[in-house]
Amino acid sequence: MLAISMAVPPSKVMLMLAGQRLIGAFTVYRQTVRPFDDKALETAQMFADQSVIAIENARLINR
């Protein structure tokens, strides 16, 4: 039997919620195998949150 060892780069998915409604997901990943630090995850969540605001604003404008 052949065993293959592969290192899988870490990834993280931030849900993009408008209230209780899921409108998307923001995914980040690394090309190297090492964990995300708290600051990187906080920054990615801020991008996801700001994206939700932009998407909701665009929806309101297009009504």
Image (cartoon, rainbow, N blue to C red):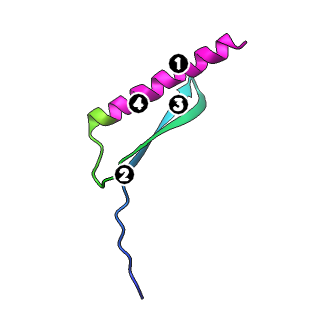
The label number, if any, that marks residue 45 in the structure image: 4
The label number, if any, that marks residue 16 in the structure image: 3
Q: Residue 50: within the magenta?
A: yes
Q: Is residue 52 left or right of residue 58?
A: left
Mark 3 or mark 4, which has the lower sequence index? 3
In this rendering, the answer to whether 47 lies above or below 38 is above
CA separation in Å, label 1 and label 3: 10 Å
**Amino acid type assigned to the residue bearing label 4 in the image:** Gln
Mark 2 or mark 3, which has the lower sequence index? 2
Asked if the residues shown at circle 1 and circle 2 are in contact, with their CB atoms under 8 angstroms apart, the answer is no
Mark 4 or mark 2, which has the lower sequence index? 2
Q: Which residue is mark 1?
A: 53
Mark 1 or mark 3, which has the lower sequence index? 3
Q: Which residues are magenta?
A: 41-63
CA separation in Å, label 4 and label 2: 16 Å
Q: Is residue 61 left or right of residue 19?
A: right
Q: Which residue is mark 2?
A: 10
Is the residue marked by circle 4 packed among few (<14), some (14-19), or many (20+) residues within 10 Å?
Answer: some
Image point (31%, 35%), residue name: 40
In this rendering, the answer to whether 36 lies above or below 50 is below
CA separation in Å, label 4 and label 1: 13 Å
Q: Secondary structure at mark 4?
A: helix
Q: Secondary structure at mark 1?
A: helix
CA separation in Å, label 3 and label 4: 9 Å
Identify the main secondary structure in magenta: helix
Image point (53%, 37%), residue name: 25
Q: Residue 42: within the magenta?
A: yes
Q: Secondary structure at mark 2?
A: loop
**Amino acid type assigned to the residue bearing label 2 in the image:** Pro
Q: Is residue 24 left or right of residue 4?
A: right
